[in-house]
Amino acid sequence: MSNFVFSTQLNQPIDIAIETLKTTLMSHHLGIVSDVNVAAIIKNKLNEDITAYRILGACNPKMAKTMIEAVPEAGALLPCTIVARELDGHTVFDFMDPIAVLGIANNDIMDTVAAEATEKLKAVIIDMEKLS
C-alpha cells in the first residue's frame, strides 16, 4: 500500500458498493461531486476492456471553502479522491489521505482541515465495513 491512500474492501459488486459509499459519506456530511468511469472511457476511446474502475470525488463544501479562502490554489488538490475498483468479485476502495496530499501546501489552516477530512474518511471506512 502507498503512503498517500488508505484502503478497504467490501464484499459487494462495485455498483452496490458505491451506493454504500455514497450513503455512508452523507452520514458524515460528505458527498460525491464527481464520478469518472475510467473503464467506460477506455472502452469508448480505445475499444479495450478493463476491470471496473471509477474515480470519485468526495467533498464537504464548508471544508473546501475554508481551504480555498486560506489558499486559493488549494482547489488544485480538491476534491478528496476515492478510487473504486473491482477485484475478484469484490470492490476495493482507495481513499486519498488528505493529510499526505494536502500537507504539501505547508499551511496551518489546510493542515487542520486535512486532519478533519482524514478523520471523517476513516470513520466512513469503519461504518462501511460494518455494513458489508
Image (tube, rainbow, N blue to C red):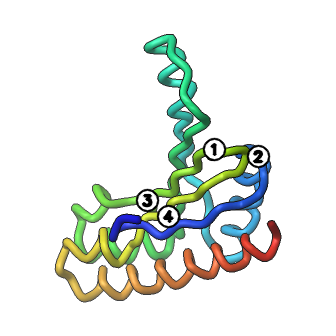
User: Which of disc 1 and disc 3 is earlier in sequence?
Assistant: 3
User: Which of disc 2 and disc 3 is earlier in sequence?
Assistant: 2
Name the outermost residue toward the front: 88
Crowdedness near tag 2: few (<14), some (14–19) or many (≥20) residues, C-alpha within 10 Å: some
Residue 101 position in % (x across, y down)? 30, 68
Residue 70 position in % (x across, y down)? 26, 77
- Circles 4 and 1, Cβ within 8 Å, touching? The answer is no
Residues 68 and 111: in front is: 111
Between the residue at mark 3 and the residue at mark 1, the CA separation in whole angstroms equals 22 Å
Q: Which residue is mark 1?
A: 86
Q: Which residue is mark 4?
A: 95
Q: Name the amino acid type tagged 1.
A: Glu
Q: Name the amino acid type tagged 2.
A: Pro
Between the residue at mark 4 and the residue at mark 1, the CA separation in whole angstroms equals 15 Å
User: Which of disc 4 and disc 2 is earlier in sequence?
Assistant: 2
In the displayed structure, 51 sits above or below 118; it is above
Q: Is residue 111 left or right of residue 92?
A: left
Crowdedness near tag 3: few (<14), some (14–19) or many (≥20) residues, C-alpha within 10 Å: many
Q: Which residue is mark 3?
A: 79
Q: Is residue 82 left or right of residue 29?
A: left
Crowdedness near tag 1: few (<14), some (14–19) or many (≥20) residues, C-alpha within 10 Å: many
User: Which of disc 4 and disc 3 is earlier in sequence?
Assistant: 3
Q: Name the amino acid type tagged 3.
A: Pro
The residue sitting at 67% across, 79% down in the picture is 126
Q: Name the amino acid type tagged 4.
A: Phe
Q: Nearer the viewer, mark 3 or mark 2?
A: 2
Residue 107 position in % (x across, y down)? 20, 82
- Circles 2 and 1, Cβ within 8 Å, touching? The answer is yes
Between the residue at mark 3 and the residue at mark 4, the CA separation in whole angstroms equals 11 Å
